Image (cartoon, grey):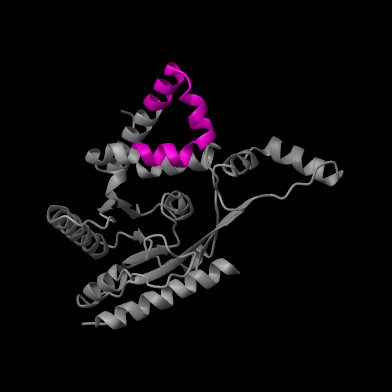
Amino acid sequence: MLTFSFRTAVRILKTIPICPKPRSIGIKTIPKEGPVIFVYNHIVLRAEPVWLGIGIPVKPHVRFFTDIKLADPKSLPILKKDIRESVFTQKFQLKANRFRWTKAALEKFVDVLARYIIAQMNRFDVIIANLDYPTEKEEISSKFKTNLKALKKCVRCLENNIPIAIAPSGGKTYEEFENPVYNTTIPTLASRLYNQDKVVKIVPSIIKERPTIDQSTYWRYVADRIIFYRFFRQALHFFRIKSYKRPTLTIEFLPPLTFERENPTKSEKVDFIKGLLQLIYDSLKK
């Protein structure tokens, strides 16, 4: 199966109009040396990591946190279901399921796409994490082992000044919750490196979609990358034949933060994450 390196994939996405291309703001604030963690807003089953991958300078290769469902062949049935629900509307699926050959074609396409995503994620050398909430003893043990392995890989990357990217709240940076669970991975990593006399630079990376990219707006973003389409729509707007508001996708890199603690308490970590989430949330509302 043909897969691409991280740099090649970024070049393709920047050159060929098959997905929205973000405009990066504040690149000069990104540290050029030392360990770096990019912290970005993310909604479950959304493509913010793709936009961030395109917007971040590709040297060195950024390591992304990825749900185990996107990288583990054992999770193929779950990934296929997620692809079906996120890519195709219910109306389209109902029409495709009316006939045996269209249903088989849809299933085959979803299966090939799911297998390709798994192969590509492993080619990217992502950091695999288990984001589920298991109840069975064996599943809990498996999650612990997976996430411990992910944590060790993060430390190795940062020790070698390879940047990593992580959403700090498991997809909950857009809204407030009554009983939120604060993931303290970021301050934990920062404190571990601080004990080695290294200060981790934590870069808030705010991804703004106007309008929000979904099944109905995705093609507006893709079409806008084609200069002839954009010129035609702007001409219609100029002559007041049909209004046109250009969609915008931006990534704003804010000045880096630090968490310099040798042996931080749980409450200190949580307070840092609360402040980080509030910073991202406030920037999104602007």
Task: Give the answer, above or below, for where 281 lies relative to 96.
Answer: below
88 part of magenta stretch = yes
Residue lying at 58% horizontally and 68% vertically, measured from the top left? 285
Which quadrant of the rendered structure holds the N terminus? top left
Task: Give the answer, above or below, for where 212 lies relative to 230.
Answer: below
Of 212 and 141, the residue lying toward us: 141
Residue lying at 21% horizontally and 82% vertically, measured from the top left? 263
Task: Give the answer, above or below, for where 201 lies relative to 268.
Answer: above
Task: Confirm whether residue 104 shows in the render.
Answer: yes
228 part of magenta stretch = no
Tell me where residue 250 appears, x and y as whole percent: 56, 57
Check the image and name the residue furthest to the top.
101
- Image quadrant in which you'd find residue 257: bottom left
Tell me where residue 206 appears, x and y as whole percent: 50, 63
Q: Quick check: 165 left or right of 13?
A: left
- Label tally: 0
Residue span colored magenta: 80-108
- Image quadrant in which you'd find residue 33: bottom left
- Image quadrant in which you'd find residue 201: bottom left
Q: Quick check: 150 left or right of 274?
A: left
In terms of secondary structure, what is the magenta stretch mainly? helix
Task: Give the answer, above or below, for where 38 lies relative to 243.
Answer: below
Of 52 and 47, the residue lying toward us: 47
Task: Confirm whether residue 8 shows in the render.
Answer: no
Of 118 and 257, the residue lying toward us: 118
Which quadrant of the rendered structure holds the C terminus? bottom right
Q: Quick check: 18 left or right of 107?
A: right
Tell me where residue 265 appears, x and y as whole percent: 24, 83
